[in-house]
Image (cartoon, grey):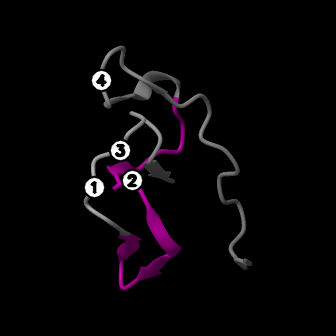
Amino acid sequence: MYAPAKGLPDNLGKVEFKAGTEELDAKGIKNLRWAAKLGSQSYGNVTVANGKVFVGTNNETRATPNMSVTAVS
């Protein structure tokens, strides 16, 4: 994939969850705008169009907590 934009963030820093929860602990994260919980599977690539982000996923609960959280900067 290729983006002609310059100066984009290349990392999010340290991504961790608050103990015993699926909530992100934002103090070690930089360049994060939002995060979304996904199902147990995702399909295809993330698509951004008209200011919206589209992700194909199911609604099934994750068997392993914290495995399917997507962070976008």
Circles 2 and 3: CB distance less than 8 Å?
A: yes
Residue 65: x and y in percent read 39, 33
Find out whether residue 20 is within the magenta segment.
Answer: no
What is the three-letter code of the residue carrying label 2? Ser
What's the amino acid at mark 4? Answer: Thr
For residue 36, the mark is none
Position above or below: 4 against 7: below
Mark 3 or mark 2, which is nearer the start of the sequence? 2
From which residue to which does the magenta span run?
Answer: 29-56
Q: Which residue is the site of mark 3? A: 62
Residue 41 percent coordinates (x, y) = 43, 60
- Between the C-alphas of marks 4 and 2, the distance is 17 Å
Question: Which residue is under mark 4?
Answer: 21
4 vs 1, front mark: 1
Outermost residue, front side: 63
Mark 4 nearby-residue class (10 Å; few <14, some 14–19, many ≥20): few
Q: Distance between the residues labelled 1 and 3?
A: 6 Å
Residue behind mark 2 = 40
Question: Which of labels 3 and 4 is toward the front?
Answer: 3
At label 3, the amino acid type is Arg
**Majority secondary structure of magenta residues:** strand
Disc nearer the start of the sequence (4/2): 4
Q: How far apart are marks 3 and 4 (CA)?
A: 13 Å
Q: What element does badge 2 sit on?
A: loop
**Label annotation for residue 60:** 1
- In terms of sequence position, does the residue under pointer 4 or pointer 1 come before the other? 4
